[in-house]
Amino acid sequence: MKSQKFKVRFNYMEVCLKPLSTTGKFSKVVQRKCFLPKDHSGKCSEFHFLSHLHTVKSSVSNKIRRDSTHTTGAAWKSSDAGPNRIFRWAMLLSDEELLEYGLDMSALKPGVQLKLREKAADYDSCIEVAIKLTYLTYNMAGAPTPPDEIKNYLEAHHGSFDLGSTKCEICQEPLNFALFNEAKVGRAAIETCHLNPRIHNAQNVGFGHRECNIAQGNKTLEEFYAWIDGILKRASL
Amino acid sequence: MKSQKFKVRFNYMEVCLKPLSTTGKFSKVVQRKCFLPKDHSGKCSEFHFLSHLHTVKSSVSNKIRRDSTHTTGAAWKSSDAGPNRIFRWAMLLSDEELLEYGLDMSALKPGVQLKLREKAADYDSCIEVAIKLTYLTYNMAGAPTPPDEIKNYLEAHHGSFDLGSTKCEICQEPLNFALFNEAKVGRAAIETCHLNPRIHNAQNVGFGHRECNIAQGNKTLEEFYAWIDGILKRASL
Ligand SMILES: [Zn+2]
Ligand SMILES: [Zn+2]
Ligand SMILES: [Zn+2]
Ligand SMILES: [Zn+2]
């Protein structure tokens, strides 16, 4: 099974980690940090590795930032759909702490609460995910070429670039950068997907076709493969 | 492949077909009819075959009526989601005719228009679907037992009852009547599904698990099986 593909290539290069001054609702919950290489010149920056992608295709860099740091969840608020997308690390707080931030978990249906809690991830894991997704993006066929500084940074984390090597983690077909442009009824054709939907870290996250991600649902990739294997066996009886 | 399971068992018993007087938005579009056996006694009725199910489990009989005669579509109106569920036969009308009924197709996104048009079905096909779904429901393990009159009617259309024979059309696992009660975040665990999502008639419609129906998406069942077969082959390389 291809889950071995999610092997840990995360080499933890030494990064600056100086605290950044941030504002906003959950700024007291985590101390956001600089992820430039240690002893870098110039200003500290959290998402410097997205800076080039942001200039050539901001929709993709915004997607990577959003998916890596925020819960999925509806674009509208309701007890059915849950709140708007919020920081994944906020989901590590207790119900009582969240109430202080104006989010009343008890007002949400139990199933929605559970789904939100499953999206919890610490800050460092979220940044690692963003770095991984940026690496995977640049290794899609048709992707733009980053400046050497960013290429070197990403390679230090995930190994040498291999253009065209990024595949849908679910169906194992190559993903083309142009797919980011395709949308059906407002949804992107490429989604961030999880080997295990309840774990959000670099080893467990990649890109997949929207239709593949939907088919996988809340199963792990292993469970999904076993499930469709059973379907095919029964269907061909 | 199991699509052979959708074989035509529809024997077209002779039915009354006397016109029913109906009101409502699209009542001029189709003449609704009596589907009791020809020369029946008592009042004419369109959905008499659902009358018993309605007394023991109205949520299921309502679902069968709704799914057989109405488009799916969102529970809210928008150019993204489309209009509320409307009669499938209304989708046989032209854009101009629909405008007279207050539905401005041109205000909907092209993708939404297309999706709605794909749900079109004539009135007779919709009733045939309702009869088939009622038959399948009574043949689920754990289903209530209908009165002989209804059993005989359904058997005349689809053959002898075989309790426990109703399977998910997609994964081929038996469906238990109790699954109608299970819901995740407000959605039933059993959905009406289509061998080909663009054809709504008795031969092409059955029940399936919600997760299976979601995984199938807008593929035909044959396409879905071929797709997951390809996934498994690539994943086990
Ligand atoms: Zn720094
Ligand atoms: Zn895929
Ligand atoms: Zn009649
Ligand atoms: Zn199923």
Image (cartoon, coloured by chain):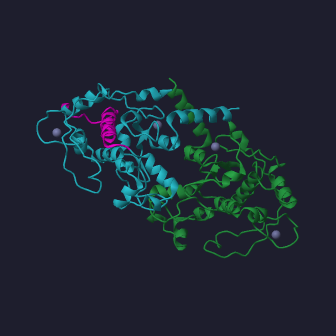
Chain colours: A green, B cyan
Residue B143 or residue A136, whichever sits in front: A136
Above or below residue B36? Residue B93 is below
Q: Is residue A128 left or right of residue A232?
A: right
Q: Which residues are magenta?
A: B121-148
Can you give x and y, in whole percent of width and height, for residue B231 in the image? Answer: 63, 36
Outermost left residue: B42
Q: Is residue B166 left or right of residue A93?
A: left
**Image mark count:** 0
Above or below residue B112? Residue A87 is below
Can you give x and y, in whole percent of width and height, for residue B127 in the image? Answer: 30, 40
Which residue is at a point 52% across and 53% down the rendered structure image? B111
Can you give x and y, in whole percent of width and height, for residue B57 in the image? Answer: 27, 44
Q: Is residue B126 magenta?
A: yes
Above or below residue A82? Residue A225 is above
Residue A156 or residue A210, whichever sits in front: A210
Query: In the image, ligand 3 is in what quadrant?
Result: top left
Q: Main secondary structure of the magenta part?
A: helix
